[in-house]
Amino acid sequence: MAASHTAAETRDAGFLELTAGRTAQLYRTACLLTGGDTHLAEDLVQDTLARMYMIWRRQNSWLMGRSRIENPSAYAHQVLVRMFLAHRRRRSSGEMPTGELPETGDQGRDSALRLTLLQALAQLSPQDRAVLVLRHWEDRSIEETAEMMRSTPGAVRTRTTRALARLRPLLGDSLAELASR
């Protein structure tokens, strides 16, 4: 019994190490995917971590400490993107919070730029938003993005081009003005 308890502790320690190192990055990606909806971003990260833990436990118990997931960090991002896209397909996800963004303590130089980008991203479809975040924020390759979105590289190229074309008019001249500060 003591040996199995030690194996469980080792398994859980590996998962805790993964989450400690990647939660902030998952949250930033989720915020971009959700167009700045921090509550939904938190929910997506928690759901992603819960799903990752279930997978982590199952695979590590079958393989006695050897994981079949080659890159757990990349897999966690893939789970996050897929959960975001699945959330947007559900009927109940049509509810959007209204009103102004709350005042924040961050009066940093780039807060206006960040808000402008988040507002523009929020106006894109979930798939367009996901492809732009993966390609330009996460700096993923076309092939990685295609795999994460369960698509083809050609479809990712096309969606990226079209999403950027939709984003440019939304940003207008304000982006160059904000970025030059």
Image (cartoon, rainbow, N blue to C red):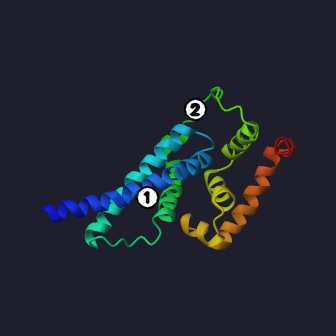
Crowdedness near tag 2: few (<14), some (14–19) or many (≥20) residues, C-alpha within 10 Å:
few
Sequence-wise first label, 1 or 2 = 1
Closer to the camera in the image, 40 or 155:
40
Which residue corresponds to mark 1?
18
What mark, if any, has residue 97 been given in the picture? 2
Residue occupying the point 58% across, 39% down: 37
Provide residue 103's location: percent of width, then percent of height. Answer: 65, 26
Q: Position of residue 153 (x, y in %)?
A: 64, 72
Q: Amino acid at mark 2?
A: Pro
Which of the 4 quarters of the picture holds residue 148?
bottom right
The N terminus lies in quadrant: bottom left
Q: CA distance from mark 1 to mark 2?
A: 32 Å
Q: How many marks?
A: 2
| 1 or 2: mark nearer the eye | 1
Where disc 2 sits, the SS reads loop
As drawn, 32 above or below 57: above
Query: Helix, strand or loop at disc 1?
Result: helix
Q: Position of residue 137 (x, y in %)?
A: 66, 56
Q: Nearer the viewer, residue 107 or 49?
A: 107
Question: Callout 1: few (<14), some (14-19), or many (20+) C-alpha neighbours within 10 Å?
Answer: some
